Structure formats: structure tokens, C-alpha cells
Amino acid sequence: MAKKKSRGFGELLKQQRNIEGGQRSLKKFQREFSKSPLSEITTEILVEPAGVAKMSDVLDDFIAPYKADDITLSQYQNLLGIGVIAWNLAILDQQASERETSDARHKILKQLRKEGLKDNDPTLQKDVESIIDEMIARKKEFFADNQRRILSYQLEDLGTEFHLSVASTLKPRR
């Protein structure tokens, strides 16, 4: 009987550590975000506003088909980066002209090739662009009603799990 209590207590301690780790991660994210240029366009950070889905959960659901169970921190960060690009391009595609979308896509992919895909492997570049196209289609099909742009994100390794924080715009006013 004592073992069951010990396991239960151990599980509670683990959950408490994860909650505390998540809170520390959120505070760190808020500090980093307040130092970024994006802080100039927003005056307030709302944490889990009422009636609005957490964008960290939404983003995690969005990239889920591409996320392996044994994903590393580095792989997860890369996947999130590609997911955020696709998410925001899909929104832009719905709100801007075809030319504006094409120009933005070209600039983003050029920067990604320059900074993120430094080895210039043409096959890898085509694969990443293909994944972005798939994700854009996924966004339009399964997340069409969510028009919140992702401004920034932070991923932290808490030891037993990852903690994702996401800054996004609120729902656009109609």
C-alpha cells in the first residue's frame, strides 16, 4: 500500500515541477518578448484570454502529423519554425492579393534558404518547401477559422517534456 502512495506522491511532485517549469518558461518568454521589436506594436500580453484557444495547443495540433514521438529539442524547434511560416503564409494567402502572398513567400523562402538551410542541398530545400505547402493546405482545411497570426514562440526542455509558449494576435475584429 505504501508503494502506491509513494508513486502517487511522486507523480504529484512531477506534475508540480512541470507546472512550475512551465510558469518559469512563460515568465522568461514574456521578458524576451518585451525586449523584441514586436513589443512596440502591442501594449499588453494576454495569457490564456477567456474563450480563446491557447495558441501553443493549436500550433502543437497543427504540426502533430509531422512530429515524431522521440523528437529532439532541435528537431522540434525546426518543425515549429516551419509550422509558423506555413501558418502565417496561409493566413496571408487568405487576406492579401496573390502578388503580395507570392512576394512574401519568395522573401521568406529566400531567407530560410540563406539562414536555415545553410548547406544549400537542393533536395532538402524542395522537401522543406513541399512540407510548407502541405502545411498551408492543412491550415486552410482544418484550421480555417483561426486567423490569429503567430508573432513569436519559445520552446523549452523541462527534462521530462517540452514547454511551448506562443505569442499571437487575438481574433481579428469583423
Image (spheres, rainbow, N blue to C red):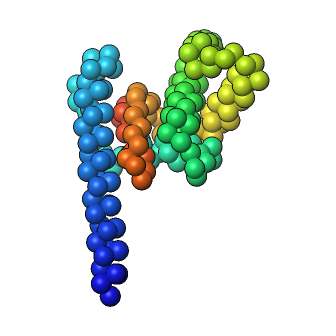
Q: Going 53% across and 42% down the picture, which residue do you hit?
A: 72
User: Which quarter shows the C terminus?
Assistant: top left
User: Which quarter shows the N terminus?
Assistant: bottom left
Nearer to us in this view, 21 or 65: 21
Task: Give the quarter of the image for residue 123.
Answer: top right
* Residue 17 in the image, given as x and y percentages of width and height: 29, 55
Q: Is residue 174 visible?
A: no
* Residue 117 in the image, given as x and y percentages of width and height: 62, 20
Nearer to us in this view, 118 or 87: 118
**Which residue appears farthest toward the front when viewing the image?**
3
Q: How many marks?
A: 0
Q: Is 161 placed above or below 6 here? A: above
Q: Going 52% across and 48% down the picture, which residue do you hit?
A: 61
* Residue 145 in the image, given as x and y percentages of width and height: 50, 41
* Residue 49 in the image, given as x and y percentages of width and height: 29, 44
Task: Report the side of 77 relative to 93 (left or right).
Answer: left
Q: Is 157 placed above or below 105 here? A: below
Task: Report the side of 158 relative to 84 (left or right).
Answer: left
Nearer to us in this view, 144 or 77: 77
**Which residue appears farthest toward the right when viewing the image?**
123
Q: Going 69% across and 15% down the picture, which residue do you hit?
A: 120
Q: Is residue 132 visible?
A: yes
Q: Going 37% across and 47% down the picture, which residue do you hit?
A: 158
**Which residue appears farthest toward the bottom when viewing the image?**
1
Q: Is 18 placed above or below 100 here? A: below
Task: Give the quarter of the image for residue 8.
Answer: bottom left
